[in-house]
Image: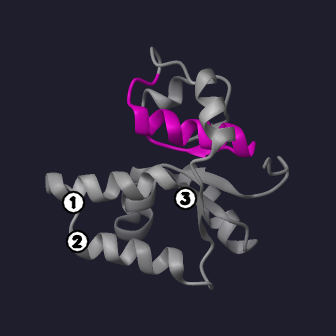
């Protein structure tokens, strides 16, 4: 599934999701504007399915609190919200070949990047390695 480029939709990575929900001040002006544009248009803001797995892992590491995880789930499950899970599917797996491991070594970051590529959407990310990608529009 590829979303039209004109859509204000975007894909957000794990840190952007956490900052969006719990610490807006960490977001750049451009990142916040991209997310707000999608919200204003009621356009989906996609979160890769791997992000939910990564959040569970970050709880185990003590980086994210269980309450934050539960709030993320509440926001995703709320039909009035625009947060939408993008599946980890064959199209995404296939696009991983275009996200070089040398540039983005972490598997979850590669999957998130491949999700944006598969959907044809910009990726909102503060990750410096992801921001080195040239085949996806990166917003930071």
Badge 3 marks a residue whose secondary structure is helix
What coloring was used for the rendering?
one colour
Q: Say which residue appears at 24% left-offset and 53% top-offset.
A: 58
Q: Are marks 3 and 1 in contact (CB under 8 Å)?
A: no
Q: Which residues are magenta?
A: 104-126
Badge 1 marks a residue whose secondary structure is helix
Considering only order in the chain, which callout, 1 or 3, is on the residue closer to the N terminus?
Answer: 3
Considering only order in the chain, which callout, 1 or 2, is on the residue closer to the N terminus?
Answer: 1
Q: Are marks 2 and 1 in contact (CB under 8 Å)?
A: yes
Considering only order in the chain, which callout, 3 or 2, is on the residue closer to the N terminus?
Answer: 3
Q: Residues within 10 Å of mark 3 (few under 14, many from 20)?
A: some
Q: Say which residue appears at 41% left-offset and 69% top-offset.
A: 21
Quarter of the view holding residue 122: top right
130 to the left or right of 19: right
Q: Say which residue appears at 37% left-offset and 54% top-offset.
A: 53
Residue for badge 2: 66
Q: Position of residue 50 (x, y in %)?
A: 45, 50
Residue for badge 1: 59
Magenta span includes 107: yes
């Amino acid at each position: 599934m590829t979303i039209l480029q004109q859509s204000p939709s975007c894909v957000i990575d794990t840190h952007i999701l956490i900052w969006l929900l719990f610490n807006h001040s960490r977001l750049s002006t451009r990142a916040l504007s991209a997310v707000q544009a999608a919200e204003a248009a009621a356009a989906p803001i996609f979160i890769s399915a791997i992000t939910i797995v990564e959040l569970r892992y970050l709880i185990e590491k003590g980086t994210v609190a269980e309450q934050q995880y539960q709030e993320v789930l509440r926001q995703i499950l709320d039909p009035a919200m625009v947060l939408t899970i993008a599946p980890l599917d064959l199209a995404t797996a296939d696009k991983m070949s275009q996200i070089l491991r040398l540039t983005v070594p972490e598997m979850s970051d590669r999957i998130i990047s491949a999700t944006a590529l598969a959907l044809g959407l910009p990726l909102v990310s503060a990750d410096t390695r992801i921001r080195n990608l040239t085949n996806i529009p990166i917003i930071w």
